[in-house]
Image (spheres, helix red, strand yellow):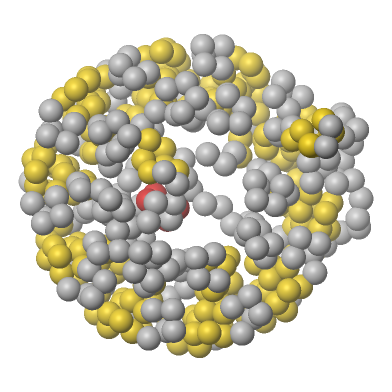
Amino acid sequence: MLQNKAFGTFIAAMLLFPSAAVGQSSRKSLDTQKGSKAKVVKLICVKSGDLYGYIDLKGVFVINPQFQPAHPFDRTSGLAIVRFGGKFGFIDRNGKYVINPQFESVQEFDAGGYAPAKLGGKWGYIDRTGKWLINPQFDWAWGFDLSVGLASVTIAKKTGYINRNGKFVINPQFDDNYDTKFNPQNGLVAATLGDKWGFIDRSGKWVINPQFDSVYFGSMLALEKKVPEDGDMMMVQSGGKWGYINKSGKYTIAPKFEKAEAFLKGSLLTPAYDSDSGWGYIDRKGDFVISPQFRYCYPFDESLGLAVVLRGEKSEFINKKGLTILESPASDITIVLDFEGVHIFDKINGLAPAKLGDKWGFIDRTGKFAITPQFDRAERFDTDTGLAPVQFGGRWGFVDRAGTYVINPQFDFVNEKR
């Protein structure tokens, strides 16, 4: 499965505390006014010692370290999840509680203003003031799937789907407890009965009866759900092998691969693994059109028509005919996934984190190192700050496009949405 670690999703545990400022701030207000529009100051969540706080782009603490842990500010709600005194709540960019710490666990708000929250051992949904929209009653709850207006919840070890009024649209009957989303192309979602997987529609009716050992959750692409899996090329596992089915449940590619990746919407090729020869690329018939020969290969960046492949201890950029367009000394390259698809290089500087030996730097579009490998770890450049988190000597700091430290390495951890 995909090796990129940049998209991991983290759900924390949370609770309530007296309403007050989260801590002494080095600024009076971060939402400064410019005419009628508020200028939002970017804050970065970092760990110093055992506590988390927030710094500005100069590395100065704006909200002092005091949380265990804290999360980045969410773009949808403008709030950040923090834990204080063993409980979790939400703060604004001025470091003040918008929702006091009171919950045993919470998740982020969706665009409709609902956030799953746990209190007294049960999950419900709160609004952005902390009031209950759906009272706590579930053993587990996931965020709402905005495409269908439903959320997956679990009661007595059975999973069903509720609407925003808290009413069951699909009664609890399934045995899975995954944050599965309806595929926007075919309107289906994976569900289990016993130890077998199938697919249901929005009414809860089985469209494809449970018969598979597993469905595709294993990679960055599926877990992040940013680029939908093709609705007529859904990955399923049977007999220890992976294959692909259409929305009617018929095999488009019979199960024969030990490892493979999903066909993303519109993609003609996807990585697959042959135990004798390594990784290559298959077409929608299941035939290798780029023969298995690589240590690993990533999905194609459709904007470039290129893919990163790892051969031996070096990287190559190949086209869809399998021809090597560029070679790079890097032994690994971190790709990125957003709503538009897979991207090798960031949109700001045209750079990508890459590894040489045991050190990380950044390569440019020629495959050469624009920033010399020197870091213990390097993450992608942030679109808001224009800076990249890097680790050196066990501490994290931030560099600019030239590789110059803007914020010297001094933090124990950086918690940023990538």
Identified at 23% across, 38% down, the residue is: 296
Residue 105 at what x, y percent from top left?
67, 63
345 over 231 or under it: above or below: above
Identified at 15% across, 69% down, the residue is: 251
Question: Residue 199: which quarter of the image?
Answer: bottom left
Q: Is residue 300 left or right of residue 404?
A: left
64 over 68 or under it: above or below: above
Q: Residue furthest front?
A: 36
Residue 246 at what x, y percent from top left?
22, 68
Identified at 47% across, 73% down, the residue is: 177
Q: Is residue 217 left or right of residue 28?
A: left
Q: Is residue 354 left or right of residue 152?
A: left
Question: Residue 293: which quarter of the image?
Answer: top left
Identified at 48% across, 48% down, the residue is: 8
Residue 64 at what x, y percent from top left?
81, 35
Q: Is residue 324 left or right of residue 30?
A: left
Q: Is residue 391 visible?
A: no
User: Which residue occupies the foreground of this view, 42 or 86?
Assistant: 42
User: Which residue occupies the foreground of this view, 253 or 332?
Assistant: 253
192 over 380 or under it: above or below: below
Residue 277 at what x, y percent from top left?
9, 42
Question: Residue 23: which quarter of the image?
Answer: top right
